[in-house]
Image (cartoon, helix red, strand yellow):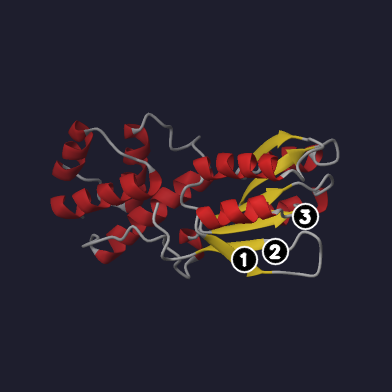
Amino acid sequence: MLTPREVQLLLERLCVELGFCLDPDVRAKLMENPPSNAAAFTDAVFIAEGLDPTTASRHLYRQVKAVVTEAFRNGGVEQFSDDMNQSANPSLVDLVAIVLTDDFSGQLSVLSQRACVWMVDTPQNRAAISAARTQGRDLTTFESRTDWSSGAEQVSLLDTVFEHHRQCTHLELFGVSVTRELLDRLAFFGFRPESSTETETTPSSFVRDRSYRR
């Protein structure tokens, strides 16, 4: 079981990294009588935020539980950094994919198993989207438009994605004709190209620098 000091540090980390900033009274109760295991502690955090652990986003739940599990495994966290965690442990890496491909139905199932997906809602994609949601995948859709090649529209979409995924450390793009405006905005958020190909959508994979500060 965690000590009061370890609970305090864990709650501070959950607030800074994932936005779970609990009320002082709730924090005090958890420090005084913390749940005895990671699963129960994670559930308590969600309930304190007014969320049902059984129906909340599975991706978000896994993120919180990964941080809590690490604290229990290490006997608490003596310190934590504002640096983006780019651990080799996949459970701690927040991978987001943006899909603008009109027909991505054949690839969505595999992609949604390893990433949070934001994708264009088209008739060709809808059956795959429905199946992925039935399986509890973290999937957000947006309307199909003719101007996604516009730098301004790409930047607006990127801002929306990062507003919901502030801890994103890896980003993959599908069907996106990368503009200078988009590259500049990615650099603003601390991202650099991870790889490139010979297609018009290059580079398609980005990673956030460890030195980035929110």
The crowding category of the residue bearing disc 2, from other C-alpha atoms within 10 Å (few below 14, some 14 to 19, many at least 20), is: many
Q: Answer left or right for 36 relative to 175.
A: left
As shown in the figure, which amino acid type bears the numbered disc 3?
A: Gln
- How many angstroms separate mark 3 from mark 2 (CA)? 19 Å
- How many angstroms separate mark 2 from mark 1 (CA)? 6 Å
Q: Residue at x 78, y 52 (%)?
A: 175
Residue corresponding to mark 3? 107
- How many angstroms separate mark 3 from mark 1 (CA)? 22 Å
Task: Label 2: state its secondary structure.
Answer: loop
Q: Residue at x 71, y 69 (%)?
A: 196
Residue corresponding to mark 1? 193
Is residue 39 in sight in this rendering?
yes
Residue 22 occupies quadrant: top left
Q: Check whether the beta carbons of the residues at disc 2 and disc 1 lie within 8 A of each other.
A: yes
Q: Check whether the beta carbons of the residues at disc 3 and disc 2 lie within 8 A of each other.
A: no
Badge 2 or badge 1: first in the primary sequence: 1
Q: Residue at x 41, y 65 (%)?
A: 211
